[in-house]
Amino acid sequence: MSRFYINEPLKSGALLTLADPHYNYIARVLRMREGESITLFNGQGGEYSATIESIAKRDLTILVGDFNPENRTSPLTIHLYQAMAKGEKMELVFQKATELGVTSITPIITERSVATLKAAQLPKKMERWNAIIESSCEQCGLNIVPTLNEPIPFNALLDRLSTGGSAKRADADHAYLTLAPTGEKSFGELINTELSGKREFSIIIGPEGGLSADEIDALTEKGARSTRMGSRILRTETAALSVISSLHALIGDWAE
């Protein structure tokens, strides 16, 4: 059944009028008809069955049906800190990380980041990135939309590791991980031994040229664990998705 993200309150029995872009996609692209069933969610948890009541020339009316509390979230809380990468690479990470069930995504600007983003470009870029995340939720069945934070400089990430609530979580249930060819332990060994009881992870992924040695040292000094995944060098978009997938396979919902 087709699923649609609606950024407004939903309630069983309510009638919703949808214009573009939903109207265009439902009526013209999918060519759905009156009486057909769809699923609606607003990112706040759960989803609603719904029926297309009527289709006009520029909008359509939806009758909201029963509520289903299913969220399909991961048993792990995963925060992805992804270094800024060029165009499609960044969008691929947002799309696939959402499908893999991350909780939040924060772009970071590192020493070797080759992608730049001017302040004037940020609103449009955030709008596009959020649209990609919402579309991924529609596709994969996730009903709670991951939080997309605005890009931050690397030093701001270091501050998060050393101040506020994050520092306490890092010592208890929260682990910070970053990839490096000289990582202290392999990813599987680290997760299966020292971090086997953790359920919240912050994953820090470098840009196309990787994190610099100084950046890795700074993260390690703040309590992040440096780990390695095999002998091959992974692209930035491959690294992010590999770490998330491996967490699911080792201790997440793929291992259940």
Image (cartoon, helix red, strand yellow):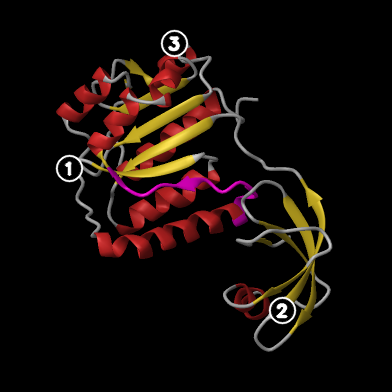
Task: Report which residue position mark 1 lands on.
Answer: 112
Q: CA distance from mark 2 to mark 1?
A: 48 Å
Point out the tag, 3 or 2, that comes first from the N-terminus: 2
Please tell me which residue is depicted at 55% across the width and 29% down the height of the picture: 76
Residue 8 x, y percent position in the rendering: 64, 61
Q: Amino acid at mark 1?
A: Arg
Quadrant showing the N terminus: bottom right
Q: Is residue 247 visible?
A: yes
The reply to whether dot 3 and dot 1 touch (C-beta < 8 Å) is no
Q: Eyeballing the image, is 196 above or below 23? A: above
Quadrant showing the C terminus: top right
* In the image: residue 13, left or right of residue 153: right
Point out the tag, 2 or 1, that comes first from the N-terminus: 2
Please tell me which residue is depicted at 67% across the width and 79% down the height of the picture: 27
Q: Nearer the viewer, mark 2 or mark 1?
A: 2
* Span shown in magenta: 138-152
Q: CA distance from mark 3 to mark 1?
A: 31 Å
Q: How many numbered badges does the structure rendering display?
A: 3
The one nearer the camera, 134 or 122, is: 122
Q: Can residue 255 be found in the magenta stretch? A: no
Q: Main secondary structure of the magenta part?
A: loop
Task: Report which residue position mark 2 lands on.
Answer: 60
Q: What is the crowding at mark 1: few (fewer than 14 residues within 10 Å), some, or many (at least 20)?
A: some
Residue 235 x, y percent position in the rendering: 30, 42
Task: Report which residue position mark 3 lands on.
Answer: 194
* In the image: residue 181, left or right of residue 68: left
Q: Amino acid at mark 3?
A: Glu
